[in-house]
Image: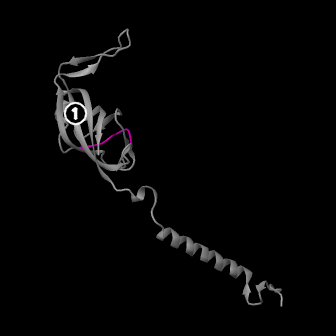
C-alpha cells in the first residue's frame, strides 16, 4: 500500500489538504490558548503609585496666581498625558511677592533675575498617579516627568509656565 494514493489521500483514508487544514486549526488554537494564559510581562505587573511633584512658577501676574487653586486638575497642553490630568493641586504657596523674572544676558554671560511689580512666584504642589522605578517617573504611564523640566501647565482657570523642582514618590 502506498502512502499517498492517486486521489491524494494519505493511506487511502484522509486527504492531504484536509490534514493541512486540521494542522492549521490546531496551531491557531494553541496560539490563542498561550496568548490568553501567558503570565503578563513588562509594565502590566507594575502597580501605579502616587507621585507628588512641585512646580515653581516665576513672574506670574497676580490675577493668574489667584486662579491657581487647591483642588484644580493640572493638564499639559503641549505633551500627551494619557487623555487625563497630570495631577491635582494639593498646595499653593507664594514664594516671592513681587515675583522675579529673568533679565537680559549680561556681558559676562550671567542672567540675573529682577523683581517685577504686580507679579508673584508660586510653588505649586501636584499629586498625580503613575509608575516609577526610583530613577524615572511616568504619570498615567505616558507623561514623562523630570526635575528641571520646564513646561506649560493649564487648569480650568489659568495657564502658566513652570519648572519641576522636586519629585517625591
- Mark 1 lies on a secondary structure that is strand
- Please tell me in which quadrant of the rendered image residue 154 appears: top left
Q: Which residue is mark 1?
A: 123
Task: Give the side of residue 20 with respect to residue 145, left or right.
Answer: right
Does residue 64 show up magenta in the picture? no
Task: Give the side of residue 28 with respect to residue 78, left or right.
Answer: right
Which residue: 21% across, 18% down? 115
Task: Give the side of residue 32 with respect to residue 168, left or right.
Answer: right
Q: Position of residue 38 (x, y in %)?
A: 48, 67
The answer to whether 42 is drawn above or below residue 101 in the figure is below
Task: Give the side of residue 92 with respect to residue 166, left or right.
Answer: left
Which residue: 22% across, 36% down? 124
- Please tell me in which quadrant of the rendered image residue 1 appears: bottom right
Which residue: 69% across, 77% down? 20
Residues 146 and 156: in front is 146
Q: Position of residue 134 (x, y in %)?
A: 36, 45
Q: Can residue 62 be spotted in the picture?
A: no
Residues drawn in magenta: 73-79
The answer to whether 3 is drawn above or below residue 67 in the figure is below
Q: Can residue 167 be spotted in the picture?
A: yes
Q: How many marks?
A: 1
Amino acid at each position: 500500500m502506498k502512502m499517498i494514493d492517486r486521489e491524494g489521500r494519505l493511506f487511502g483514508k484522509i486527504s492531504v489538504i484536509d490534514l493541512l487544514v486540521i494542522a492549521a486549526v490546531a496551531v491557531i488554537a494553541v496560539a490563542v490558548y498561550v496568548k490568553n494564559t501567558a503570565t503578563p510581562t513588562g509594565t502590566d505587573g507594575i502597580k501605579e503609585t502616587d507621585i507628588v511633584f512641585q512646580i515653581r512658577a516665576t513672574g506670574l501676574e497676580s490675577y493668574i496666581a489667584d486662579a491657581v487653586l487647591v483642588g484644580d486638575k493640572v493638564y499639559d497642553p503641549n505633551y500627551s498625558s494619557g487623555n487625563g490630568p497630570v495631577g491635582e493641586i494639593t498646595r499653593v504657596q507664594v514664594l516671592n511677592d513681587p515675583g522675579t523674572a529673568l533679565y537680559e544676558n549680561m556681558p559676562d554671560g550671567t542672567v540675573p533675575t529682577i523683581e517685577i511689580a504686580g507679579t508673584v512666584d508660586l510653588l505649586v504642589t501636584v499629586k498625580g498617579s503613575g509608575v516609577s522605578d526610583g530613577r524615572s517617573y511616568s504619570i498615567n504611564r505616558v507623561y514623562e516627568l523630570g526635575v528641571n523640566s520646564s513646561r506649560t501647565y493649564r487648569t480650568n482657570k489659568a495657564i502658566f509656565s513652570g519648572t519641576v523642582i522636586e519629585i517625591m514618590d
